[in-house]
Image (cartoon, helix red, strand yellow):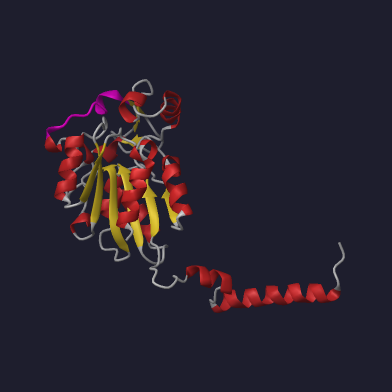
């Protein structure tokens, strides 16, 4: 379609102005206005959701979608699942790319990552543990399972497979798909849990036995959701970790995956932590 010469001149002028704004570091008016809080409002923190082992970031979908509708910037972080040290460093480096306040949310093994990655980062305002490992310095995920005298059957139902480049003695660990629905997600529809079993991401076995670093929950306010029917992390251990972190604690009658079985409860906790 042919456009009048005057129309093309306007288009070129607008493009030139936009390019100049980018060079000078000035955001276009619409973008700049979107970043400004309204009267009496505070800047909403970026919510970084960190999944755990035997799962991926898609597990946050029900929670993330509703939080986005509420106006929160949301990032469902992809956890490498290679080990507490390297995974935490990856998250720590990732957080340096986010401007403004951050609320870190960790599920299961993801809790060990937010515990380490947030230490010393002044932008992280709150930590939210969803049936997660709020580990202490020098403590391993495996050791944390024993807190409070609880018991988990997950170690007895692991399938171990080698992976390229693994260090000596390490391998990938999966939950046996036959046991996965009843261990990981017994309150979800059977078909949903079966697909989660088939699509699970493995964790390096070393991630279970690597000592944690200085915990961020000692200096950053924390919230904790105990899953009272959890068969992966014993609820007794979750209660012990929540109390040790002096976390604002809510207990929910759910399996290991509250973000899927009780998403509204998870959203309520995250929004409280975001205030």
Residue at far top of view? 178
- Count of marks placed on residues: 0
Question: Which percent across, then down, holds residue 135?
Answer: 20, 46
What's the magenta region?
A: 149-158
Where on the picture, by quarter, is residue 107? Answer: top left
Whole-percent x, y for residue 32 in the image? 52, 72
Which image quarter: residue 188? top left
Task: Check the image and report above or below for 44 versus 56.
Answer: below
Query: Could you tell whether 9 is left or right of 65 in the image?
Result: right
From this view, report whether residue 10 is shown above or below residue 248: below
Looking at the rendering, in which quadrant would you find the N terminus? bottom right
Which residue corresponds to the image point at 35% horizontal and 26% vertical from the top-left? 180
At a point 25% along the width and 24% down the height, the residue shown is 156
Q: Who is closer to the viewer here, 249 or 211?
A: 249
Above or below, 2 relative to 65: below
Quarter holding the C terminus is: bottom left
Asked if the magenta segment contains residue 162, the reply would be no
What percent of the width, then of the height, locates residue 177?
A: 38, 23
Q: Is residue 85 visible?
A: no
Left/right placement of residue 218 relative to residue 275 reads left
Residue 96 visible? The answer is yes
x then y, percent, for residue 198: 44, 27
- Seen in the picture, residue 158 relative to 249 is either above or below; the reply is above
Residue lying at 45% horizontally and 48% vertically, measured from the top left? 66
Q: In screen coordinates, is 113 left or right of 198?
A: left
Residue furthest out toward the front: 39
């Amino acid at each position: 379609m042919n456009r009048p010469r005057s129309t093309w001149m306007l288009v070129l002028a607008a493009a030139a102005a936009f390019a100049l704004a980018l060079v000078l570091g000035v955001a276009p008016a619409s973008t700049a206005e979107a970043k400004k809080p309204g009267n009496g409002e505070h800047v909403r923190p970026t919510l970084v959701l960190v999944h755990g082992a035997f799962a991926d970031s898609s597990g946050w979908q029900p929670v993330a979608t509703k939080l986005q509708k509420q106006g929160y910037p949301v990032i469902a972080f992809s956890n490498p699942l290679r080990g507490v040290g390297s995974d935490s460093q990856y998250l720590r480096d990732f957080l340096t790319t986010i401007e403004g306040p951050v609320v870190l949310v960790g599920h299961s093994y993801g809790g060990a990552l937010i515990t380490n990655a947030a230490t010393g980062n002044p932008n992280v305002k709150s930590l939210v543990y969803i049936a997660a490992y709020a580990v202490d310095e020098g403590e391993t995920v495996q050791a944390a399972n024993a807190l409070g005298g609880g018991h988990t059957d997950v170690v007895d139902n692991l399938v171990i497979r080698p992976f390229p480049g693994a260090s000596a003695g390490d391998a990938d660990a999966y939950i046996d798909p036959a046991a996965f629905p009843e261990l990981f997600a017994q309150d979800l529809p059977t078909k949903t849990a079966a697909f989660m079993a088939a699509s699970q991401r493995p964790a390096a076995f070393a991630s279970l036995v690597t000592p944690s670093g200085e915990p961020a929950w000692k200096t950053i306010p924390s919230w904790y959701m105990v899953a009272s029917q959890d068969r992966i992390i014993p609820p007794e251990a979750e209660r012990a970790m929540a109390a040790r972190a002096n976390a604002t604690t809510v207990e929910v009658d759910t399996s290991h995956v509250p973000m899927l079985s009780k998403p509204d409860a998870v959203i309520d906790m995250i929004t409280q932590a975001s205030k």
